[in-house]
Amino acid sequence: MVMLLATLFFGSLASWAFLFPENFNAVLPFYELRPMHVSAALFWILTGAVSGILHFRNELFAEKKSNSLAETLFVAIWCTTAIVIFVCYGLKLFGGREYWEFPPVLNIPILVAWALLMVSYYSRVHFSKRPVPQYFLMWCTGILFFLFTFIEQNLWNFPWFRTSYLKEVAVQWKANGAMVGAWNQMIYGTSLYIMVKISGNESLALNKKSYIFYFIGFANLIFNWGHHIYNLPAAGWIRDTSYFISMLEWILFISIVQDFRKSSPKGSEKKHSLPYQFIISSEYWVLANLLLALLMSIPAINRFTHGTHITVAHAMGTTIGINTMILLGSTGYIVKIDELSARTQTRLKFAFVVAQISLSVFWLSLIIAGLIKGYRSVYLDIQDFNTIMQPVLNLLKIMSVAGVFLLLSFGWIGVVYIKKLFSTR
Amino acid sequence: MFLKIWLTLVIAFLVYSGIVYLFADVRHKEEQPDDAVNHGWVLWQQKNCQSCHQLYGLGGYLGPDLTNTASNPYKGRKYMEIFIKNGTAKMPNFHLNDSEVSHIVQFLCWVDKSGSSKVKAESVHWTGTYRIDK
């Protein structure tokens, strides 16, 4: 939760530093704020995902034992590394690549911590339960593939991977793209688990359709990272494979639309539960972002959207709209946020609505900004960067104002969660 | 059945990874980076240039994409050296020495040789994909 507050704070500051760099450069320049924002977001998503699956694993297997040594060490190393990373940024010490800008030596403790987590996780689960619920498979897959993709993300430290710029970039974005798929396995698994628990309908995680979707998601994790590098003059089959696989997601898209049409307002009590509302809102954001991702995955459209703020809209829409909503639902479920007083509940729901509206404005302004940038740079072929950006900046001002409201609404929710967490303990 | 599909996908991941590592760059036309280029690349990361600038449309949005600035007839090497050395109102001065500036510029010249960041309209195929010629 602290990382959520940090990513909101640094993200909001970074957006203003982007608009008025001359005012920030002497104190806290954009190139320092952006990695702070991104790293805090990564730690929020990963730590939130791991916290959820460890808690729910204990629930699922009726695990009463206290934390294992491996788990305690994981937490200690993980948190210490996060703090060291922020100290490095404060000292302007970088060295990594996009999203992992900290000095590369700090990847070692992260890797060690993750290995300890895996030891702890896999040693306390058993696969004898039949049929295996889909959320459990997603957690197991996510943990394993985070390890694979994290190692891959660091292959650039071996000189062979740096003998060609095209190869290096292809491997970098293969790792980045698949890693998002890995943490989505963990987070979507948690979302499904909570839906099962709230509805009491275990078949949600056992029906044939859910397994088909699991495999589509898995195939996307493996092959669908290519849309990040469509315009890179690397091998054409990377583009074609990604294009083909991503089009399979239309099946998901159509299915989600059908499910929305079929869904009826059953279980009025559940509808008022805040964790339930977070999970449901994430489904709307899945729909919106999936449509955006599908369009961006068509190379002919990607030609206009690549390198524009539409990419940012996609990243923000998924990390805030989907990942953060699910994690707030999951954390709220764990700390029993519904037990708070009616007055606090009302306030939380107000903040929830403000967050949804702010995120919608934030997301749409980025998309329009991206459309304008793509039109001016690709269609009009304007060469001068400042001329391209002039009309874009006004939309980014709207985005920054919406960002402040996101900070306030999610920030307040975060503070209430933290208070509840401590009172529960 | 489930396990078989799962294992097949895991193996597919490993095999596909190997193929990407070996054959992602099919052109093999670019030069191998020398020490100066490699040092420029490290500096690019250590100064976190990617936070504000893009290469092939990947990176930040505060400054321009620098993939082909080196070969731009209106900009080029000297232009980049002046910007990197002095900064601008938007870009901080990183107080780099001449050798460091030169190495970053050499890195950017090397990247420039790997291809163009813009996809021409005529490259787009009717199926929606496109082919990129260097």
Image: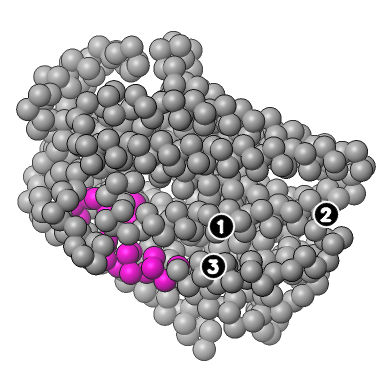
Residue drawn 62% across the image and 37% down it: A358
The one nearer the camera, A190 or B102, is: A190
Image location of residue A131, percent across then percent down: 67, 84
Circle nearer the N terminus (3, 1): 3
Horizontal arrangement in the rendering, residue A227 relative to residue A53 (left or right): left
| Amino acid of disc 2 | His
The residue to which callout 2 is attached is A272
Image quadrant assignment for residue A22: top left
Q: Main secondary structure of the magenta part?
A: helix
The crowding category of the residue bearing disc 3, from other C-alpha atoms within 10 Å (few below 14, some 14 to 19, many at least 20), is many
Image location of residue A175, percent across then percent down: 39, 54
The crowding category of the residue bearing disc 2, from other C-alpha atoms within 10 Å (few below 14, some 14 to 19, many at least 20), is few
The residue to which callout 1 is attached is A286
Q: CA distance from mark 3 to mark 1?
A: 20 Å
The residue to which callout 3 is attached is A141
Horizontal arrangement in the rendering, residue A304 relative to residue A120 (left or right): left
Image location of residue A159, percent across then percent down: 24, 47
Do the numbered discs 2 and 1 sit on residues whose CB atoms are within 8 Å? Answer: no
Q: Is A240 colored magenta in this rendering?
A: yes
Q: CA distance from mark 3 to mark 2?
A: 32 Å
Q: Secondary structure at mark 3?
A: helix
Quarter in which the N terminus of chain A is drawn: top right
* Chain of the residue under label 2: A
Image location of residue A242, percent across then percent down: 33, 64
Indicate which label's residue lies in the foreground, 3 or 2.
Answer: 2
* Chain of the residue under label 3: A
Residue drawn 28% across the image and 14% down it: B87
Q: Is B120 colored magenta in this rendering?
A: no
